[in-house]
Amino acid sequence: MKFWGKFYFVFLAIIFLGLFFILENSSIAQVLSPFSFAMMFALVWANQKIWLVCPAYLVASIIVDHSLQGIISALCCVVVLVIPYLLHYLYKKPIQVWEMIIYAVLSQAGKIGFSAARGGNLVYYSVISAILGAILMLGFMKLFEAIFVRGFSYRLSSIELIAGGIILVALSSGLVPLDINQFSFLKLFVSFMLLTITYCSKNYYAVFIAAIFGFGTLITDGNPVYFAPFMLWAIAISPFKTYRKYFSAIALILAEIVVGFYFKLYYSFDWLSLLSTGVSAVIFVLIPDKVYFSVKSIFDLKGDRAAIKNVVNQNREILHRRLLSLSDVFGEMDKVFRGLVRKNLSESDVKKLLRDEIIAKNCDACPDRARCHRTRQDETIKVLDELVSIAFEKGKVTLLDLPAYLNANCGRVNGIISSISTLTRQYKSYSGMLSNIDTSKLLIADQLKGISTVMRNLSKEVDTEIAFDNAREQKIMEELLFNDIVCTDAIVYEKNSYMFEVAIIVRNSDSDQLKIPEIIGKICKCKMVVYEKFPATRPGYTTLSLKTSPKYDCVFAISSNPKTGSPASGDSHSIMRLDGDRFMFALCDGMGSGEEAEKTSETSMSLIENFYKAGFDSDLVLSSVNKLLSLQKEEKFSALDVCVLDLKNGVGDFIKMGAPCGIIMSENECKIVDGGSLPLGIIDKAPPVTKKLVVSSGDIIILFTDGIADSFASDADIQDFIKESYSNNPQIIADRIVEQALANNNGRAIDDMTVLAIKVFNN
C-alpha cells in the first residue's frame, strides 16, 4: 500500500511537470504568458499538494527558460505563493480569494522587474500578463473547485466550462512549438482527444473541441494552419462513433491523408507526417473499452438521470396500485367490524324480557299461580310492568313503590322486589358492557375506514406521472453556481398546474442562504419557499426541498391565564402545519381546572393532532376521539374549537364541540362563528358543529375558551369589544381580550382563559 501511495505521488508529479512544461511554452501573440502561473495558483487553491505543484512549476519553468532572469522569475513566483501559504497555515487562517489575487499579481514582480530593466514595451506586456493571469486564475479556481470537490459526475457551470476551454486553448498553444522533425505532439494530443470525445459523447462535442484546439494554435502566432484540419478530423470520425473503435481510427488517418495530400493545408507534408495521427489511433484502439466506459459516464449524466426519472414514475405507478389494493382491504375490514356490532334490544323488549324472568323466578312454584296468571292475568302483568319501569328509572324498587293490589294478593312480595332490583342492575351492567364493546368495534371500524381513505387519497396523489423540467434544472444549477452556491444536483417537476416542487443538493455551508428561494423562484417564475431540509447521502451536503409558496400565509399569537387559585390551566392549544399548505389551529378546554383538567385537555389534543397528521378527515377525527373519551370509566369532557385553514385558497373549516363562538375580524367587519354541540366524551354520537368560511388578506381569526366567553355578558359584547380593540398585531388583540376578561371580574379569572389569534395575509 505504501509503495502504491508513493507511485501515485510520483505519477502526479510527472503530470504536473508535463502540464507546466506545455503551459510555459504557450503564449498569446508570443508576448503574453499568463497560463502557467495562473494554473499553479489555482491548483494550490483547490487543495492539491503544494509540495508537488510548486516544484513541478519551478522545474518546468527552468527547463523552458534556464537563463538567470528566467530562474529568478520562477523562484520569485514560487516564493510569493509558498511563504503566504505557510503563514496562513501556521495561523490557521484560510486564504481569501482577494488575497490570492494579490499574491498572483505580486508573483510576477520578477518578470516585471526584468522587463522594466530591458526597457521598451516589455514592461507593459509583463503587467498585462500578470493581470490577465490573475483573471484566468479565478476561472481555473472555479473549475478545479468543481472537479476536485464535486467530482466529474456533476454538471459544470458556464464559467467553469469557459475556464476548461481556456485550458484546452493554452495546451494546444503550448504544444505548437514542441514538434520533433515531422512528429507533432500537437497532432498526437488533439487527434487522440477527438477520438476519445467522439467515442464517449455526442458528435458535436468533438467538432466544438476541435474548434477550441484550432483557436489555441491561432492565438500563438496568428497562423490558422491547424484550424481547418482539426475541424475536418472531427467531421470525418463523427459518423463512425456507433461502430467499433477501429473504424473511427481508420477514418482519422484517411482524413489526415486527404488534408495533407489532397487539400495540402500544411506547409509541408509527407508520409512520415502521418506518424502522429497513426500513433494516437493505435493508442486509442489498444485502450480497453472499460476505460472509455468510465469516461463515458461523465458525458452521459443526463441520460442516467433520465433513466432515474423513468424509474421514479414506474415506482409511483407500482405504489399507486398497491395503495389502492390496501385501501380495498381496509375497506372490507371496516364492513366486517360494523357487521359485528350487536345492537341493544329496545326498552319495551327489555322490560318484557325482565318481566318474564321475574315471573319465572317467583311465580312458577307458587300455589296461587293459576289465580294470578289466569283469572287476573291483565292486572298482574300491568303491575309487574309498572314495577320494572320504576326500577329502570330509580335503579331499584322498595315496599313504598308496591301497589295495594300486589300487597293484598301476593305472598311473595319480598322475592319480587329483590328479583326486580337484581335483574335491573344486572341488565344495566350488561347493557353498558355491550355498549362499550359495540363502541370499541365501531371505533376500530372508523379507524379502518380512515386508513382506507388515507391510502386511497395517497393512491390518487401518486397516480399522476411526474413531469420533470430538464431545462429549468440546468438553469438552476448554473445560476446557483454563478452565485457561488455549489449545487451538485437539481430536480424540478410540476406537481400540478400551479405547483412546482424543486429538490437541490448543496453544500452544508450554503444550505441557509436566503437567496436560494429567490434564485429558484425567478427561474420557475413563482415565489418558492424551503419546506424541508435534511442531510444528503454525500457527507458535507444537504438536500433542500422547495415548493411554490401558497397564496396566503399567517402569523398567530396566544394569550392565556389560569383560573385564579388553580395550579395549572385546563386549556391546551395546538398549532400544526398539515400537508397541502394547511394549518390546524385548535383550543381544547378540559372539564374543570387544575392538573386533572390539564391532563384531559392534553390527551384530547394529542389524539386530534395525531389523527390530523395521519391525514384523517375532520369528521372521522372528532368521531373517533369522542368514542375513545366516552369509553373512559370516569366522566371526562373536553370542549374543542378547531380551525383548519387552507393557505392556497383562504378557506377555513371551523369545527366546534362544546366550544364558544369564534370571531373573524377585519378592518370593516366583525363576524361571529357560532358555537354549540356537546363537548367531547359525553356521548359517542355527538355530532360537531361545522362551518366552512372564506377569509381574506388582513382578516384575523380569534378563538377562545369558556373562561373568556363567560366573562362577558354575551357574544355580542365580545364582538363589540373586539371591534373597538382592532389592531394589525394579533398578539395585541389576544392580550387585550384576556385583560378585559379579567377586568370584567375584578381582576379574577373565573375559569381558565385562553385566546388564539391568527392573522391571514397575502404571501
Image: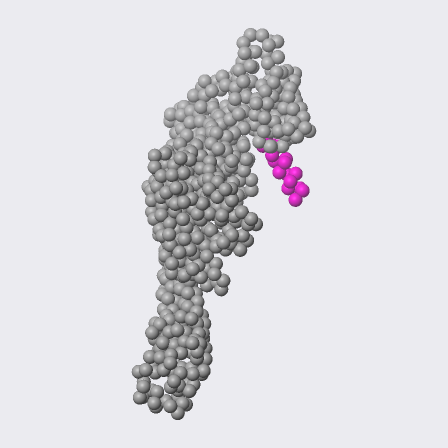
Q: Residue at x 43, y 65 (%)?
A: 440
The residue depicted at 42 percent of the width and 27 percent of the height is 211
Question: In the rendering, at what x and y percent does residue 591 appear?
Answer: 48, 55
Relative vertical location of residue 373 with respect to residue 140 in this rendering, above or below? below
Residue 179 appears in the rendering: no
Toward the right, the furthest residue is 90
Q: In which quadrant of the rendered image does the C terminus lie? A: top left
| Left or right: where 703 falls relative to 79 | left
Count the marks: 0
Side (left or right) of 32 relative to 378 = right
Residue 131: percent from the left, percent from the top? 54, 18
Quarter that holds the N terminus: top right
Q: Main secondary structure of the magenta part?
A: helix
Residue 12 picture quarter: top right
Task: Answer with left or right where residue 16 lies relative to residue 198.
Answer: right
Find residue 190 and report its horizontal and vertical position in percent.
47, 30
Q: At x 45% / y 72%, what residue is drawn?
A: 429
Residue 16 belongs to the span the image colors magenta: yes
Instruction: Please give the range of residues in magenta.
Output: 1-17
- Asked whether 63 falls inside the magenta stretch, the response is no
Query: Observer-nearest residue: 96 or 23?
Result: 96
**x, y percentage for residue 195?**
45, 35
Any part of residue 212 in sight: yes
Which residue is depicted at the point 38% across and 27% down? 262
